[in-house]
Image (tube, rainbow, N blue to C red):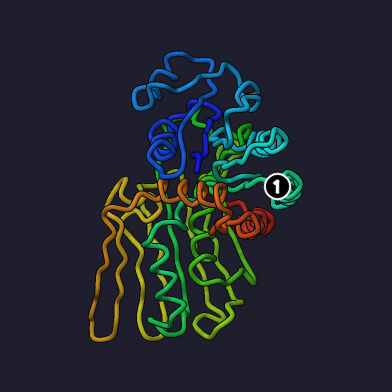
Amino acid sequence: MEPVRWGVLGASRFAREHMAPAIHMARGGKFAALASAWADKASEFRDFCPDLKVHPTYDALLADPEIDAVYIPLPNHLHVMWTLKALAAGKHVLTEKPIAMHAREIDQIIIARDNARRLAAEAYMIVFHPQWQRARELVQSGAIGRVSHVDAAFSYDNRDDAQNIRNRADTGGGGIRDIGVYTYGSVRFVTGAEPQDLQARLMRENGVDTWAQVTGTMAGAASGYCPRFTYSAMTSMRLFPRQEVTFQGDKGMIRVANAPFNANVHDMAKIELHMPGQAMREERFPRSNQYVLQVEAFNAAVRDGTPYPCPLEFVRGTQAMIDRVFNVGIEIAI
């Protein structure tokens, strides 16, 4: 069976360091083309893919009949437009998160996906990592009993990089859209629950949220492991780096730490299972590359119709939660 031939729209740093190498390494695919008007940036991709075809424009790459799928790492405000253009060009498309700025825009993409009979997905890579799959298995098997509280945190500090797209309102920046997808979506994935009531406090700079604290309750899991629980999440682009999610039950606790959203990039992926009597079991995942696993799942879905584990319908739920946080958020200053 022929490999899925991939093109990448834009020579972003993240594409160069993570996703393009993952596409190149993943089974069932081939990194075949890049769209970039900058020869020096293109040369950095050719360092690991010498036979790469380079197109001068995004439209030229979408018109290339030898390309089956495209990866879109553009700034947030361009995601919907180029995802729809890629589908209209007959390409399968994997778009960086968040795939849209509002949940209603994902409805447009779902319709376009179905009409084009192509796969469209958000690059929400953590659900492909075995540490998150294991956390989900433990929670949903009742390993920690009935879940009563979940708290999540993701922070970094980019205050000295004013031109970073995350610090710019005109490019759809802000901490919630950049990392709230993890503190909200990871909990939805592991528990199967959805937010019931939410409160939020936000701090902003130059039109983008730089800190947010969300509290409330989540519920809706089909079985008795977490029918309703309290929830707390913090995101910030102005604090010392921190990544952690903790699931607390009446019989134990699961802690997903060691930079769980950037597994094996900043630290080794692991989960801790805490049980009564101060017992703790640690499980480590040193060799898994979530970006490669994501691309391999995408390739399998394109090549043989294997169901894609993270469909747009799931992604829409996380974006709806983001929309809700912005709607209820109260701006504060310290």
Residue found at the very far top of the displayed protein: 39
Residue that appears at 54% across and 36% down: 71
Q: Where residue 50 appears, x then y in whole percent?
A: 38, 21
Check disc 1: other Cα within 10 Å, few if <14, some if 14-19, many if 20+: few
In the rendered image, which quarter is residue 201 located in? bottom right
Q: Where residue 263 appears, x then y in whole percent?
A: 35, 52
Residue found at the very far front of the displayed protein: 1
The local secondary structure at tag 1 comes to: loop
Residue that appears at 60% across and 24% down: 61
The front one of 329 and 310 is: 310
27 vs 168, left or right, is left
Q: Where residue 284 appears, x then y in whole percent?
A: 26, 62
The front one of 18 and 65 is: 65
265 vs 9, left or right, is left
259 vs 74, left or right, is left
Q: Where residue 203 appears, x then y in whole percent?
A: 55, 48
Task: Name the residue beneath numbered marker 1.
Answer: 117
The front one of 293 and 269 is: 293
Residue that appears at 51% across and 46% down: 299
In the rendered image, which quarter is residue 72 located in? top right
